[in-house]
Amino acid sequence: MTVLLTGDWSPFGKDDYFRRFEVYSMGWPNDINLDSLSLTSSNFGGPLAVMRDRNKVVKVQGGGKPVISMYSSSGNFISSIIWNSGKIVKLGWSSLCDLLCILEDGHVLIYDMFSNFQHRVSMGQEAQDTKVLDAKIFNTASGTGVAVLTTTHRIFLVNSVREAKVRRLPEVPGVHNAPTAWTVVCEDRHCRVLFARERDLYSLNEGETHPHPLTIELGDETCTIIEMAVSSNYERVAIFTDRGKLWIGSSDLKKCTRLYDTRSANLPTQLVWCGVDAVVINWGLHLELVGPFEESLHYNYDETVFCIQEVDCIRVVSSQSMDIIQKVPEVVRNIFGINSTAAGSYLLEASKQYQKKNHRANEYLHLVKPKLFLAVRQCIEAAGHEFKAETQKMLMKAAQFGKTYLDDCSPENYVTMIRVLRCLNAVRHPNVGMPITYNQLQILTLQGLMELQMIRRNHFLALDLATFLKMPDSSKIRLHWACYKVEHSKLNDELVAKEIAEKIGSSRDVSYIKIAKKAADCGRNDLAIKLIEYEPRANLQVPLLLRLGEDQTALIKAIESGNTDLVYAVLLHMKENMPLGKFQMEIRSFPLAQALYLKYCRLHNKDMLKDVYIQEDDHKSQAECYIRESFDPKNSSTREASLVAAEESYKRAKLDLNATLCEEHLRLSKYQRNLEDKFKRDFFGKSLHDTLKLLLTMQEVKLADKLRHEYKVPDRRYWWLRVKVLGELGAWSDLEKLSKSKKSPIGYEPFVEVCWKHGNRYEAQKYLPKVKDDVKVEYLTKLGMFEEAAQMAFEQKDLEGLRFIESKCDPSFADKVASFIRQLSK
């Protein structure tokens, strides 16, 4: 069994091995001929894109337009593009399986793997004007970048096609000579270009104006650099010359680990890295692997092959098969290596013998027991690196066998690897066609793998795997599937909405609004409206309904939610997008909405408020609007007009009393304007009371009397006003005359009060005899006449009055008041 497992191993140096194994028998069309095609592939076992190589002379069959065909790694057809958008300089893939088509005119057209156009990126005006000669596609921390070489031999670069910011790199001296080779190196979010012109090497860095000359020893002063390749981690670079020399070293070119002579006069078709352990030279019918030290290895093929560089291996594609060539992982080498003494190797043999019920199982177990924990871990890890299910099972059985002899061995690693293997086997199946390795999965992560399955539209596989792996974000997969269904399903809207609702249910993790927005973006408004009905949150429903023109439905949803802010938002949207009359008719059917709209108008737009009242024939409310306008200081010049309008509205509303009040106020306003003209004082806008007070203050008593009689001001109110004004003026003689003119309708207490308030006790005493007896004690006390007040209170047997006096009088008089209280208390 071990011999079979290591049969595809080839020694590479002293201790290492490389292995080549077939992953797929290609399923693409029989008439495909890779000799005449150019091929490119996405990373992590991604899809392939092929088109006719324009540099090769072949017989053209069918139409004259180029066709880009896309296949899975197993050769299953995915989609195709009949190309009519300009000359393609370079084809490649982004890290998210988008096809990048770099054109001669300096544009990058981006398609998904199903031939749907996504967007266009420009490499700048200069690149458009001078035309693109060559291009490179590379991966960075921020996404997938593109660098283009123009016919003027200038290089322009973007670090991410998602956020294309074009950077112009320094110009290399000798613009008339094209570079013989160039490549991109990325380090810590910074990209630079290695630029070779014949034997001269330069480093072109972002943000700098001059290139940096570089020097390396190539073993021949007259050679020309014709090819360069950078490892996936950008730490190593390989440089190939026209004399067949291969230079291998660090990407900064400061350290050379090997200068290898291929002794070949032919030019290679490809130069790629197999992980970081070997450089692969593709000679067409055979591959030469060259290590950084003294290692080398050859693989022969019967037909032309293409090599696809991955982070830990290469994929080799031919018309018949797809192979993987990789360095044998150390843990696998330790377990399956001939005469291996590794703990995992002993445990595997013990497990095999145990299954055969051979007593030798105990002997192997005894050998491995001191390192049993390590052995279990090695078997679990080695299983992850294997592609064949039989080998995986054999290693996992060995790990399970070893676990039974460990008391404190956690099952977590074992269970996790079981899940990971099932996941890997599922995506490696030819129907899916994603030959990802365990090392690649460690870099991509399970989350990234799920996202790639969504991009490939393997939604149900992704959902099954996410459920099996107990990943928390399966809702993201459902959402992506629903959006895809909306965009591509040919079923009627009712069936699509029903199918989506059945699959998603009432899960709050999936937003129906996002699905509905996708439907709206695709022009399927009826479907969007049906999907909105499944969204329970009104604050999410309403904005999209408004966008779709479903104003009335949005208003109903907002009202049902009880959220007044949401109702206001709908009302303002409707008002801005409807004729005013139609808007007002629409909201009449919704009392709450109309009430909120009126409140809004009352606060922010009085004219709109009147328009509503006019529309509704609400004359009373119209009149109230006019009255509020008349009292606004800004509208002093139009006050009479507002009052006239208010009077007319009250009449139409048959509110005669209100109309009369408006008429009287209008007369008062006119009278006030006359007074202003006569006295040059501010009368306009004052109330009747304030107008009378101002006239009395000006001692225009006759005019005040006339105005008082005209508006039938009650005697008590008028006398109060006169007494108050005379007190403020200090007109004590006029106050006395008033008190004697006729019997006061307000009594004489106000006279005493006014005199006392303005500090004139003498005048106040004149009116004390006329004050009522029941309040005389209070006023005597206010005026400081404590003895008279106390005597009167004693005579009236008024204990409360005496206590009031006691609280106000001097201490010298308090004893006498106290004696009065004692006498009355007996």
Image: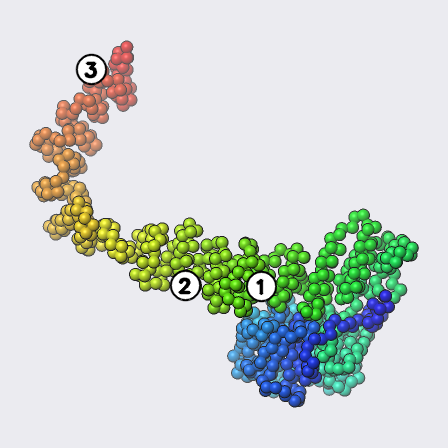
Give the residue number, with chain letter if any, for mark 1: 481
Q: Position of residue 396 (x, y in %)?
A: 79, 58
Q: Position of residue 513 (x, y in %)?
A: 50, 59
Give the residue number, with chain letter if any, for mark 3: 795
Which mark is first along the chain, 3 or 2?
Answer: 2
Dot 3 surroundings within 10 Å: few (below 14), some, or many (20 or more)?
few
Residue at the top extreme of this rendering:
826
Question: Which image quadrant is residue 184 in?
Answer: bottom right
Q: Which residue: 87% across, 63% down?
A: 340
Q: Which residue: 75% across, 62% down?
A: 384
Q: CA distance from mark 1 to mark 3?
A: 102 Å
Question: Which image quadrant is residue 224 in?
Answer: bottom right
Dot 2 surroundings within 10 Å: few (below 14), some, or many (20 or more)?
few
Q: Is residue 406 positioned above or below 324 on the image?
A: above
Secondary structure at badge 2 equals loop
Give the residue number, with chain letter if any, for mark 2: 549
- Residue type at mark 1? Trp
